[in-house]
Amino acid sequence: MWRVGRVYRIQFTKPIDQELVVDLDFSALSHKSERDLELLYLWCKEGWVKSALGDYHTQKQALSRYFLAAVVLADPVLDVIRRELRRLSPDVRIDTDQIKAVLEAEVLKREVLEGDRAEHAKRKISRAASTPLRNLPAGKEDTPTPETPAGGGPVQA
């Protein structure tokens, strides 16, 4: 009896590599679990038509430890950390290079800073950093819409 379903993304590099996207145990699914229902949607016809699996992989990749480490070490984030540290300790002079060195040596794990996945994440983050937010496709920004104001309450007319 077939109980486990796995979907891999094949990467045509040298050597050819694979990345696990979804690992689903059909015998352990619960109809009450929202996560299980979302994973099942990836397997259904509507999910395939809407390329939900590709979107799921993109979201999973964006939340990976490699991408998050690359974002933390990006210059804009280092500038924000520096500004906050200066606000907390106005007498201390801290450089972004010092912050980056401490993050790399003492805060982040070495595995998220080195290797092919880490390099891929760094390249993708540096490319994205050069793209201004106004050039993003509609709906890709995290700005409130008139239907959902920043406070989260109903729109007052």
Image (spheres, rainbow, N blue to C red):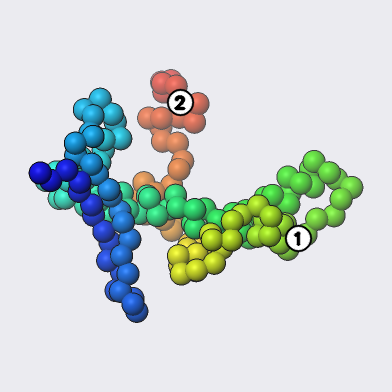
The residue sitting at 72% across, 57% down in the picture is: 102
12 relative position to 155: left or right? left
Image coordinates of residue 125 in percent, x first then y, are 50, 62
The residue sitting at 23% across, 29% down in the picture is: 30
If you read the primary sequence from the N terminus, does the residue marked by circle 2 or circle 1 appear first? 1
Report which residue position mark 1 lands on: 98
Q: Mark 1: which secondary structure? A: helix
Image coordinates of residue 29 in percent, x first then y, are 22, 33
Looking at this rendering, what residue extends furthest in the bottom direction? 14
Q: Mark 2: which secondary structure? A: loop
When the figure is inspected, residue 27 is found, relative to residue 60, above or below; the finding is: above
When the figure is inspected, residue 145 is found, relative to residue 84, above or below; the finding is: above
Quadrant in which residue 84 is drawn: top right
Work out which quarter of the rendered image holds the N terminus and state it: top left
CB within 8 Å, label 2 to label 1: no
Q: Amino acid at mark 1?
A: Gln
Report which residue position mark 2 lands on: 152
| Classed neighbour count for the residue bearing mark 2: other residues with Cα under 10 Å, few (<14), some (14–19), many (≥20) | few
Label placed on residue 125: none
Q: Mark 2 and mark 1: span between their CA atoms?
A: 39 Å
Q: Amino acid at mark 2?
A: Gly
The residue sitting at 27% across, 66% down in the picture is: 10
When the figure is inspected, residue 11 is found, relative to residue 48, above or below; the finding is: below
Of the two numbered discs 2 and 1 in the rendering, the one whose residue sits closer to the viewer = 1
**135 and 65: which one is in front?**
65
Work out which quarter of the rendered image holds the C terminus and state it: top left
Evaluate whether residue 130 shows in this view. Answer: no
35 relative position to 156: left or right? left
Image coordinates of residue 70 in percent, x first then y, are 54, 59
